[in-house]
Amino acid sequence: MADQRPDAGRLARRTGAARSAVSRYGRRGLGMLRRTPFPRPTPRGWTVLVAGIGLVAAGLVTSMSVAVTAGLLLVVLVVLGVVTALAVAAPLRASRSAPRAVVQVGEVYRERVTLRGSAMRFAPRSTLLVREQLDDLFVSTAEPTSLLAVGPASPPAVLDVEALAISRGRGLVGPVTVRVEDPFGLLRIDRPVVSAEEVVVVPGSVPLAALDTGALAGAVSADEGRVGQGGSADDSELRPYRPGDPIRRVHWGQSAKRGGLHVRQTTQAQPPEAVVALDVRREAYQQLGRDDLAELSDLGGDQAFEHAVVVAASVARALSARTSRVALVTDEPGGDVRHSGDAGGLSEVLVGLADVHVRSGARDVTDVLHGVRGRDVHGMTAVVTGRCTPEQAAELVSATNGSSRGVLVTVVPPDPAVRGVLDRAGWRVLVVPVPGSSTVGHAR
């Protein structure tokens, strides 16, 4: 009896472990099956299935066992195809690795899809059709579809995808789907293995040499070297002397008054903030006096607005190299002010430009700039628009009187009256023409 009790205990433990393993693998298998679509017959599969059912029915009616047997064999062949397809498709696992989720128009988006099959030794080895779906914002430079072999003795299969970003906006990459067929070609499973992910395509750039050397330098120079909203690069403060401080920094007069050594600590000058205001009114980009053919093909002003978005992105990139913070302001459909880049990141401004759209009935830029007041933006303002009237120029000057300088960036040359109003206020004017216009961009 003493020898039987340990044997009974070991048997119980082994039974419990086996039951636990079966339960664990069973739950895993059921989860895989729930994620796997049921196989769909191919045209060949429908033919075989209909022929099998027809032979069985005819054999039963005519009492021909041979027909019944042949029909059952065809039906069993379809059932075996279902089992084989599920055995391959259910254990599939895949992952996507992409270095960036934000790309620029004209850049190539790259990613790698890694596909793994079942690790069981008796699992079948299969060649699968793997496809990555791309949004209309991209044009594939490398085929996003490939035949990949997976199996227990095979290394993970890899699909490298390259796509050229051709338009700004937010697009979806994916899902990655795998097509599995049984060895007889009777059934097919299209299973998504990697879900879709969002990729933001930000605007590109246009050459702005005039902005870098003229308009921007003049607009920012008045603000450079100031600390916060007041002060200068010569401002300094005193602190107690610490071992290692240079003797030349000791302020002897204040040290004598305070009864201990104190050194000068220079406060670093901070560059100013900057605002890029983009005009989203459709009427500002229609009938701009461009070439007749260009006007005819762009009656809605969409091409001109897209050019303005690229110009705004170029201005933001140039300003980010000279200022401590760049913010984008536009008019939102609900009448709110879209304000991107409060933290000073250029990437936030570019992502904001990827989302803007031209609209009819949008508010004027001057109305939008009123929402910027009180947001601690005391640097310069760059307004990007298609057309500016003398009345709008005067309103711009009054709406940005808290900023030291400003730049008006237009896609067509403004009227001399507009230039006069802005010149008297210390603004610079930059013209970056739309493709199709004979005007050469210049700044003054």
Image: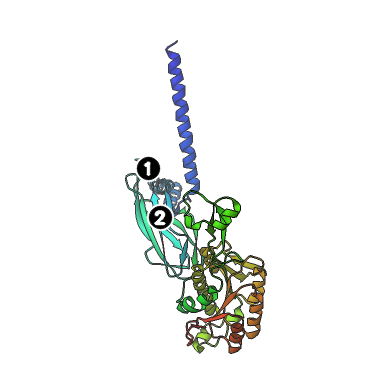
Does residue 340 appear anywhere in the picture?
yes
Q: Which mark is residue 113?
A: 2
Residue at mark 1: 119
Q: Mark 2 near mark 1, Cβ–Cβ under 8 Å? A: no
Horizontal side of residue 34 vs 150, given as left or right: right
Indicate the amino acid at tag 2. Val
Is residue 388 something one can see in this rendering? no
Quadrant placement of the N terminus: top left
Give residue 408's quadrant in the image.
Answer: bottom right
Residue 438, how many percent across, how many down? 47, 88
Using the image as rendered, state which of residue 279 and residue 95 is in the foreground: 279
Identify the secondary structure beneath mark 1. loop
As rendered, which of 151 and 269 lies closer to the eye? 269
Q: Earlier in the sequence, mark 2 or mark 1?
A: 2
SS state under label 2: strand
Indicate the position of residue 76 as horizontal and vertical percent values: 41, 46
Q: Say few, some or many: other residues with alpha carbon within 10 Å of mark 2 (under 14 / 14 to 19 / 20 or more).
A: many
Residue 136 horizontal side relative to residue 278, left or right: left
Asked whether 319 or 20 is in front, the reply is 319
Percent x, y of residue 39: 45, 51
Residue sitting farthest toward the left: 153
- Cα–Cα gap, marks 2 and 1: 18 Å
Query: Is 39 placed above or below 119 here?
Result: below
Identify the amino acid type marked 1. Ala
> Camera-side residue: 134 or 26?
134
Q: Residue furthest top?
A: 1
For discs 2 and 1, the disc positioned in front in the rendered view: 2
